[in-house]
Image (cartoon, rainbow, N blue to C red):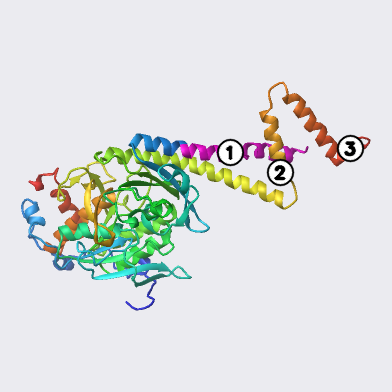
Amino acid sequence: MTGPDEVRAAVAAGVVGSSESFRALLSALVEVARSIFGARASSILLLDEETNELVFEAVVGEGEESLLGVRFPAGHGIAGWVLATRTPLVLEDVRNDPRFAGDVAEGTGYVPNGLMAAPLLHDERALGVLEVLDRPEQAHFSLKEMDLLGLFANQAAIAVDLLLRARDAERVLAGSADEGTTDLEVVARLASVVHELEEERRPAGLRLLRELADTLGPEKRPGSTA
Amino acid sequence: MDGVVAHGWDAAKEALPAWSLPSDAVDRITLPSNWPERVTREWAWQGSTGSGVRVCILDSGVDGKHPLVAGLEQAVTITLGENDEVIAEEDGEGDVSGHGTACAGIVRALAPACAISSVRVLGAGFTGSGGVLLGGLRYAIEQGYDVINMSLSTTKKPFAAVLHELADSAYFKRTVIVASAHNMPVESYPWRFSSVISVGSHEEADPLAFFYNPNPPVEFFSRGVNVDVAWLGGRTIRVSGNSFATPHMTAICALTLSKHPELTPFQVKSVLYLTATNVAGAT
């Protein structure tokens, strides 16, 4: 294996599967957000810049089964406003009119009575929106909760940035495989498998890969003068 | 307004006078001296209805038919042309989120006789492009509104310099910009500029209670928590956020300018300071 290939394989080993980990992190974040605010549901929506749509990326509570992956136009509704203006918003007493939270209602028919929404800001970009739906009705909203929502949104924005980077990297790897130049995805899988081997089996695995590389590598074929 | 209107206004191309004051010109800038010994709320804006003042809501559009908004002077939507020229067209869509209607309703409640216009910079496939926001603000300044309510901000640094220039232009053209401070610890604009009036929230229920902040950049706090506002479909809902504190200050500016139309933005801000709840003029 040549130098650049080793680097690429190492990068690939870091990338493969990482988007799943970051997605799990997003799920954990919305779970904590829901729990802290005592809410019925919480979700993270990401902006798909190509289609100008918001996509449910993590959902916990009401709509958990049906909303994941659901898309809607980003220019309208509460989440759209929060995204475009980069400004958090808290609404209450909105029941009986789906337009108040059409983004949620379209997916499930579930119309929240109230919602808190904050933009996910990273550097200059607005990556998506964090929503917390239906806090307990008797809970009086205060500025302390607004601050807490902002802190959560900042944390979620970092996780979202990592997820987007991982997806970009995966796309590049998959792209280079499609082009038939180097099947880095396979290399990445191999690197990943070897990395996860139990300690006593790892040296044998690495030896096998080295043999494989020597066998496949044109300049190091047995009998060659290289 | 019919069709397309292009705006190529450039602050740098305005005629430049000489910045000096010859002795024979002193008489020409004599100012009315009707300031009271002590500026109070009673002098500043009590009894005012906002009549004669033109307020612009730069937002998601406004439902002018909502009973709590009670009519608009004008409603336009902003887009950018091929060469980034600002296009303002009559807005047939109204409010795309409910937010602009909420802001307009708050202004109407406190300053019932002011004229409210809507300049929509959201919707129409737009998700956070600062260009449309800048275009809308530029259009609103050209229209010569007395007060522009901006319950929004942008985090895009490349827009900051132009926004700053626009905010200063408004300031010198006697247009007061009232802008929401951010609820989150991020850098955004235009509320951080000293030529605008920046507003955060307090938790009290009195719509006319507002506080001067001796530790800027946020200069004033007004009512922004658990506010009942106009929303889509002729309804009202309860909302919280600096977005809703801002139109409270916008309305107080409108009341003040209605009673004292000669005031510049600098003087309006001074009056707000002197009549703030935590400053002597409030009592």
Specify whether A218 is left or right of B126: right
User: Within 10 angstroms of label 3, few (less than 14), some, or many (20 or more) residues?
Assistant: few
Rendered position, A32 above or below B98: above
| Residue placed furthest toward the top | A200
Nearer to us of marks 2 and 3 is 2
The tag earlier along the polypeptide, 1 or 3, is 1
User: Within 10 angstroms of label 2, few (less than 14), some, or many (20 or more) residues?
Assistant: many
Q: Which residues are magenta?
A: A1-27
Nearer to us of marks 1 and 3 is 1
- For residue A18, the mark is 1
Specify whether B106 is left or right of A225: left
Do discs 1 and 3 belong to a common subunit?
yes
Estimate the x, y position of residue B201 in percent, counting from the top left. 24, 45
| Residue type indicated by callout 2 | Leu
Q: Residue placed at 66% from the left, 48% from the top? A: A174
Estimate the x, y position of residue B49 in percent, counting from the top left. 12, 62
- For residue A221, the mark is 3
* 2 and 3 marks in contact (CB < 8 Å): no
Residue B195 covered by magenta stretch: no
| Residue type indicated by callout 1 | Ser
Q: Residue placed at 20% from the left, 64% from the top? A: B67
Residue A4 covered by magenta stretch: yes
Estimate the x, y position of residue B135 in percent, counting from the top left. 38, 65
Do discs 2 and 3 belong to a common subunit?
yes
Number of numbered tags placed on the structure image = 3
> Which residue in the structure is indicated by mark 2?
A184
In space, the residues marked 1 and 3 are separated at their CA atoms by 35 Å
Do discs 2 and 1 belong to a common subunit?
yes
The prevailing secondary structure element of the residues shown in magenta is helix
Q: Residue placed at 21% from the left, 52% from the top? A: B228
Specify whether B255 is left or right of B232: left
Give me the chain letter of mark 1. A
